Image: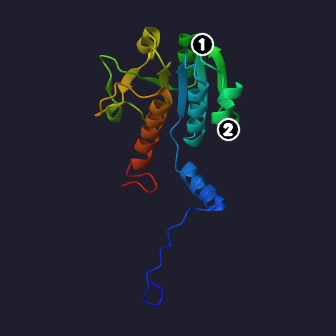
Amino acid sequence: MNGGVQVNTRRQLRPTDVKRLNRAWRRSTEGRLALILESVTSPFNIGTIFRTAAAFGAERIWLAGNATPPTTQKAQKTALGTDRLVPWEEPAPTLSAVQAAREAGFTVVAVELSGDAVPLHQAPLGGAVCLALGGEDHGCSPALLEAAAAVCYIPQVGRVGSFNVGIAAAIAMAEARRREWARPEAPGGP
């Protein structure tokens, strides 16, 4: 209130305020997050996933199969340089990428519509988790699904059968972080 008149103090944060806010969230985030992108070929999707991974603090991305590297000109338009913020590995065979993730201490959880998949909100996303997502047309390969420690899907209530891989990656990363941040002992937790 200002002289009996209510003043609206909502405004967009200034760049310095955004940096301060992000720094506070970084300090309260301990869970390790990584991705395996198997045969994701669309430069738009690769750029989108890298940008989102950078925002959620993913520590590494393994490219597998015939995945498009983020250094292609079209991917750069969407990634906006974030490929420099998230270390990534050149495309390798899928099982090599899974093995590398495991050796780095990650539990690999595939995001796919499969018969044994659990809803994302029930997936084992705690600790060091590496989310594995498959290509635009065929999703995760049978080899990737077999190698993953768990498989989850994103529940949908609309009349669409699946999400774009870039959106699916964003939803899964957001859920992994949300779970960590919602713990009672987390700063700002319930």
Q: Is residue 162 left or right of residue 159?
A: right
Residue 3, compared with residue 121, is above or below; it is below
Label 1 vs 2, first from the N-terminus:
1
Who's the residue at 65% across and 26% down the image? 88
Helix, strand or loop at mark 2: loop
Colouring chosen for the image of the structure? rainbow
Q: Is residue 1 left or right of residue 18?
A: left
Residue 66, compared with residue 179, is above or below; it is above
Helix, strand or loop at mark 1: loop
Identify the residue under disc 2. 80
Residue 8, compared with residue 93, is above or below; it is below
Find the distance from the CA under tag 1 to the CA under tag 2.
Answer: 22 Å
Q: Nearer the viewer, residue 151 or 112?
A: 112
Mark 2: amino acid = Leu
Residue 181, compared with residue 70, is above or below; it is below
Identify the residue under disc 1. 66
Who's the residue at 47% across and 90% down the image? 3
State whether residue 21 appears in this view: yes
Residue 139 on image: x %, y %: 45, 17
Circles 1, 2 touching at the beta carbon (< 8 Å): no
Who's the residue at 42% across and 44% down the image? 178
Mark 1: amino acid = Asn
State whether residue 71 appears in this view: no
Q: Residue furthest bottom?
A: 3
Number of residues whose C-alpha sits closer than 10 Å to that of mark 2, classed few (under 14), some (14–19) or many (20 or more): some
